[in-house]
Amino acid sequence: MKRVAIIGTQGVPANYGGFETLVENIIGEHCSDNIEYTVYCSAKDMPQRLDEYKGAKLKYINWRANGVQSVFYDITAMIRSIRGYDTILVLGVSGCTFLPIFKLLSRARVIVNIDGLEHRRDKWTHSIRKFLLLSEVAAVKNAHTIIADNKGIADYVTWRYKKDAKLIAYGGDHALRNVAQEKQNEILSTYGLVKNAYSISVCRIEPENNCHITIDAFAKSGKPLVFVGNWQRNEYSRRLKERYGNCSNIKFIDSIYDLDILYTLRSNARCYIHGHSAGGTNPSLVEAMFLGRPILAYDVVYNRETTYQKAYYWQNSEQLQQLVERNDLTGNNTMLVAQQHYTWASISKQYEELY
């Protein structure tokens, strides 16, 4: 029996982001019988404190898993997992400055998924970026194995650190749901939507996700847009909603975690808009690819690698507007890529092979 501790997420059940969804799926139905998971969770972020979930043990840390507190959160989890585990899987680099000490005290195999290049994200101050770069250096130098979720990230690790990273993406087939047509019609009606008559974007409302470009393009085109996100989280999101709130063709919808509703809204859309410019393989993009809708993605190497060059790409409002106004877009190619590369059964197996 391999005992694996997972560190770095808000926790499960998943209700936040990509790493949480990753954990939700690798500990579940695709987990082998010889793997015993323990997931460290934030006592401050999780609405209910379960002792066990999908066969995994849950342990709680009294820090938040995001922002500045994430550093102390991750380090505390590492300290508590020094003994009793064969492997620790660290998701993100926030607490990785502690890894040199951890390795002196523990015999566990250390695997780190470095996520995107956190130190390049626009939302951080200069000092935080410097710290995150230091954390990334510590992660790459001290982990037994580095995971990159995108070829662009793997190439970066090789270029900067002269080390190989194991390429393991995210799964997205959990986005597929068996939702009765009657229920789908009811959901669409609730949001005032008509099948194939709107485009949709689902993301955290951050500058690096180019939400301002997406909204500006649709405001100019007059084409219907449904934008799902955390619209009250920060000044950037509130300012966007206030500025464009009177655009009758744009619906601002708060974050949705009900997978049936998300499936209905995304699978019935005309196009899926993906504005992420940072990170590696964005889970929301992989999920959308399974639904067979045309993908209009921001033109960076990570998005091109994830979609295997099969999507449509834009870099500014004018280019996105031109794409939105076309009538010959197709999503079949990206759906085939997703079916071949991004199933959770395959992703879970790749992680277990590393343990």
Image: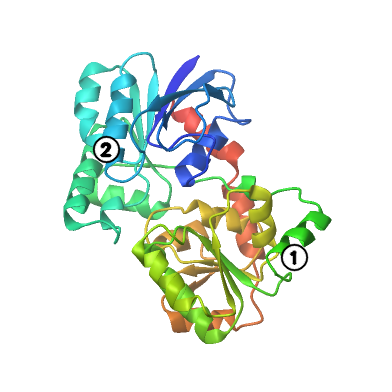
Q: Quadrant of residue 39?
A: top left
Q: Earlier in the sequence, mark 2 or mark 1?
A: 2
Q: Position of residue 71 (x, y in %)?
A: 27, 38
**Residue ID at (34%, 23%):** 109
Above or below, 117 against 166 in this view is: below
Q: For this rendering, which residue is in front, 149 or 203? A: 203
Q: How is the image coloured?
A: rainbow
**Residue ID at (29%, 48%):** 158
Q: Quadrant of residue 190?
A: bottom right
Type of the residue with mark 2: Val
Q: Quadrant of residue 329?
A: bottom right
Does residue 85 show up? yes
Above or below, 70 against 194 in this view is: above
- Calculate the distance from the C-alpha at mark 2 to the C-alpha at mark 1: 44 Å
Q: For this rendering, which residue is in front, 177 or 170? A: 177
Type of the residue with mark 1: Ser
Instruction: Check disc 2 and report the residue beneath it.
Output: 71
Instruction: Check disc 1 and report the residue beneath it.
Output: 189
Label 2 sits on a secondary structure element that is helix
